[in-house]
Amino acid sequence: MDIFTEWLLTTTTVLAVAVFLTITLYYMISLTRPNKPVPNFPPGPPKLPIIGNLHQIPTNKHRHEALWQLSKEYGPIMQIHIGSKHFLIISSPALAKQILKTQDHVFCSRELFRTTKQLTYNFVDIAFSPHSGHWREMRKLLVSEFMGPKRTKLSNHVLVTEMESIIRLLSSNLPNTEVNLSNMFLEIVKQMVCKVAFGSDYRRQPVKGPSWDVMLDEALELFNGSVGDSFPFLGFFIDQFTGWNRRLNDGFKNLDAYIDAIIDDHLKNNTEEISEEDKDFVHTLLDISSKENASDYRLNHADLKALVMDILVGGIDTTVVTLIWLMSEINKNPRVMKKLQSEIRNCTGKIEKVGEMDTTKMTYLKMVVKETLRLHAPAPLLVPHLSLSHTQIDGYDVFPGTAVLINAWGIARDTNIWGENAAEFYPERFENVEGDFGRDRFEMLPFGGGRRSCPAMNTAPANVEFVIACLVYWFDWELPNGMKSEELNMEDGGTLVLRKKVPLCLVPATKHKWVN
Ligand code: HEM
C-alpha cells in the first residue's frame, strides 16, 4: 500500500467515525429534549418556488373572486403565499367573528407594505398604521372632530344645499335628458367632504398636475399595492423594472402637493380670528397641533397630512360607489324602485324643500342600502388585518405577522348563508334581522369589524339614504334609449374599491307632483 492510499484510508475512517459520533450525539440529545410540536398550518393550494401562489391570484382585479373559488376547494380558512408573504384567507362568518371579535386584540394591526409607507407619511395615518397609541389618538381625532355632531350638522347642511341645486338642475332639463349619475354622485360627495374637511371648494383643479378625479383614481390604485410589496429584498428592483416606483413617486407627489396647498391656505388664516362655528376640520387640526393636549399627544405636520389623505382616499369613493350601485340595482329591479318610491313619498308627505326630508322613518330605504352594501361591499377584502402574536384559529396555528384577508365579498354572496336567492337584489331579506353587521353578526361586513372597523359605519349610510331619498322622491327614473332593465350592465371593476365598470346613465323622466 503506498503512502497516499494509506493516508486516504485513515482520513476516510476518521471522517466516517466523526460523522457517526455527531449523528449519535445529536440523536441522544434530541431524545432528552421535550418534543417540539409541529405547527398545524391551515390548508392551501400548492405553491411554486419563489412566487408562491402568485400565478393563482390576480394582483389587480377580481382577487376576491379567485380567492373565493380557492376557498371552495381548501375551506373557509386557507393559507396562501405570495412571494415571501403568507396570507390567511377567511371565508365564513364564524371565522370572521373569531378574527374581528373574539380575537380582535390579536388581529388589530396592519401589514407594513413598502408602497403604503410613502403614501401614509411613514404609516402615521389611521387606516394603514400599526396598532399603537398613535393610531388610537388619530382615530379618536377623526371620530370626534370629523364625524362629531358639529361637522355632521355641517355635512347635512351641505348635502341639503347640494341636493337642492341638483334637483333644480335636473328639473330644468326635463324631459328626457340623459344624466351621468356616476359623475353626479362624485361631485355631490366631493363637495360634501371638501366643504367639511377643508372649508372651501377644493374639488376643482387644485394645483398644477392631473385633475382631481385622475389623482384620486391613481391614489386608490397605488394603495392597492404592488407585486414588489410581496418580495422584501427584490421588491424594490421588481417595482423599478415594472415602472411602479416612478408611478408611485409621481402619484404621491401630486397628492402631497394638493394636501400641502390645502394646509398652506389654512396657515395663511389666523385661526384665533375664526369663530369656532366657522372652523373647518383642517383649522381644528392646526389648532390641536399647536397645543399640547391632556394626553400629551402632539399632532405633527405629517400626522395632519396623513389624516387628510385618509379622508380623501377612504371617505369619497366608498360613498360614491355605494350610491351608484344602489341606483343601478333599483333601476334594474322596478319592483323595488316602486316600493321604495311609495315609502319615501308616503313618509315625506308634501315637501317643498329637500331639507325637510326625514329618512329615519324609512325602513325599506334602510333595507335597500343594506342590500346594496351586501352585494356591492366597496372593499371586498376589507383592509388586511395583521396578527400581533401566536394564536390558533379553528385549531390551526397562526403566527405573528400573518396578514389576514377576510373575503367580505364571498361571505355576503354565499348561498349557504343567504339562501338560493343570494345573488338576487332582495331588500326584504333584512326584515326582522336584528343586530349590527361587524359588531353582533358577521354574515356581511361592508364596514369590516372590531377595533379596525370603519369609523364612518353610522354616518356614511345616513348620507347615502338622504341622497337617494331626494332623487327617488322627486323623479321617476328611466333607462336611456329604451334599454330594458335586464340589459343594464352590472359588471364591476377597480381594485381597492369595487366600482361599476360602465358609468350609470339614467333619465329623470317625470318630476313628482303632490296630489292632495
Ligand atoms: C359607504 C361608505 C364606506 C364604506 C363601505 C367603508 C368601508 C370600510 C372598510 C371595509 C374598512 C376596513 C375595515 C376593516 O379593516 O375591518 C374601512 C376602514 C376605514 N374607513 Fe371606511 N368606509 C366608508 C366610508 C368612510 C368614510 C366616509 C370615511 C371618512 C373619512 C372612512 C374612513 C375610514 C378609515 C379612517 C378607516 C380605517 C380604520 C382603522 O384602520 O382604524 N370610511 N372602511
Image (cartoon, rainbow, N blue to C red):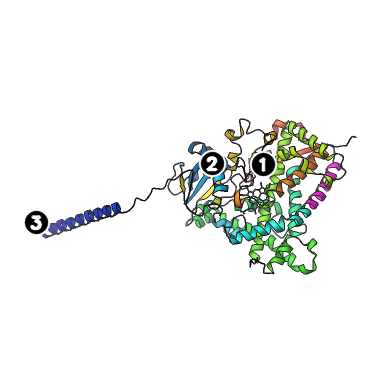
Q: Amino acid at mark 3?
A: Met
Q: Earlier in the sequence, mark 3 or mark 1?
A: 3
Label 2 neighbourhood size at 10 Å, few (<14), some (14-19), many (20+)?
A: many
Q: Is-magenta flag for residue 160? A: yes
**Foreground mark, 1 or 2?**
1
Q: Which residues are magenta?
A: 156-179
Is label 3's Cβ within 8 Å of ligand 1?
no
Q: Nearer the viewer, residue 30 or 258?
A: 30
Gap between marks 3 and 1 measured at Cα: 87 Å
* Quadrant including the N terminus: bottom left
Q: Earlier in the sequence, mark 3 or mark 2?
A: 3
Please say if 219 is above or below 94.
below
Is label 1's Cβ within 8 Å of ligand 1?
yes
Q: Earlier in the sequence, mark 1 or mark 2?
A: 2
Q: Identify the residue position indicated by label 1 in the image.
A: 373
The disc label shown at residue 67, or none: 2
Gap between marks 1 and 2 measured at Cα: 20 Å
Asked which secondary structure carries label 2, the reply is helix
> Could you tell me how many numbered marks the image carries?
3
Q: Identify the residue position indicated by label 3 in the image.
A: 1
Q: Residue 511 location in percent, x, y? A: 85, 38
Asked whether the viewer can see residue 253, the reply is no
Q: Amino acid at mark 2?
A: Leu
Q: Is-magenta flag for residue 286? A: no
Asked which secondary structure carries label 1, the reply is helix
Residue at x 34% of width, y 50% of height: 35
Please say if 291 is above or below 152.
below
Q: Amino acid at mark 1?
A: Leu
Say whether residue 243 is left or right of residue 12. right
Task: Name the quadrant containing residue 275.
Answer: bottom right
The disc label shown at residue 291, or none: none
